[in-house]
Amino acid sequence: MKKIVSTIIFVFLLKALVFAQTTVSCKADPKLPDTAAGVFPLPFSATNPKGGISDTACLNAYFNYTFTIAVPKTFNAGIIGTIPITNIQLSTTTAVKNMPTGLTYTCNPPNCTFPAGTKGCVIIYGTPTNPANVGRTDLQITGLVNSILPIEVTFPNAELFAAGNYYLHIKPAGSPACKTSSTRELAATKLKMINWPNPFSGSTEVQVEAELRGRFEFRVYDFLGKMIHRREVQLARGINRISYDANNLAPGVYVYTITDGVNSASRKMIVE
């Protein structure tokens, strides 16, 4: 009897851990040309009245919005001239300023470091809960352009890319203008993951509890955001298991992701 009770408790804790640590992910806008550089969409301004955040949030309703970051290979540093860019780096917790209560963000790559010549994204998501936030909030994204020396920047940025504002409009609950659903509905309700053992050496097994079915990609990234493994997997509704051999990996923290290009979830694993 004690063994049965212990098993039930373990399964319950396992499910709670999976739900708590599954995260939302995003996908860079595939329509942007390779020559694009900056944060997209471009901000709202007098010369770009259709720019900025196009969706309206609503109190007590799930919301998300994705910014694409296209990193050029060089940076105009004023009197210094044009210098090469290594990457643009954002904090994983404090890069988006003036965030309304109930909203947070995450990046793709998960470490919020975007190498030169690549495209990534930042997704703002969550449920606004504070009536004091009803109205217009002026969001800003802060980070570092890493080059010969790190240079602090804030987007929108007239000197770097484009001037303007990223206004997020929040309406009262039930307002008809609100965006109350999303094509990237909170992935944590659809894909729940855990790997066991973790930490581990050798190999581990990833368990995916899915409310979706179809073809997905299983990816593994190192903590600098470099993809080191990718393969296609077929998910069925319910419990799915994916074996992963890490014998060729150095000890450290890695991020694994399951995605179909729209719905994504990520978690950390530790190789000893």
Image (cartoon, rainbow, N blue to C red):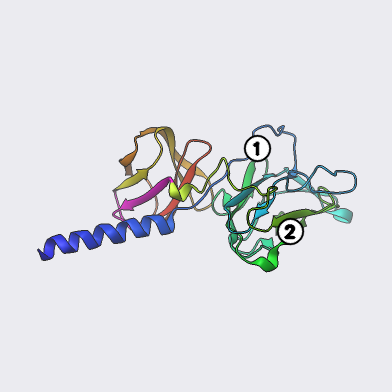
Q: Give, as a single range, the part of the protein colored magenta.
A: 190-202
Compared to residue 216, the image places residue 98 above or below, namely below
Residue 189 relative to residue 126: left or right: left
Amino acid at circle 2: Gln
Q: Which residue appears at 73% of the width and 55% of the height?
A: 169
Q: Is residue 198 magenta?
A: yes
Q: Residues within 10 Å of mark 1 (few under 14, many from 20)?
A: some
Q: Which residue is mark 1?
A: 29
Q: Is residue 81 magenta?
A: no
All told, the count of numbered labels is: 2
Amino acid at circle 1: Asp
Viewer-side residue, 189 vs 226: 189
Residue 10 relative to residue 218: left or right: left
Q: Which residue is mark 2?
A: 140
Q: Quadrant of residue 94?
A: bottom right
Q: Position of residue 223 (x, y in %)?
A: 50, 53
Residue 151 in sight in this render: no
Mark 1 vs mark 2, CA separation in Å: 20 Å
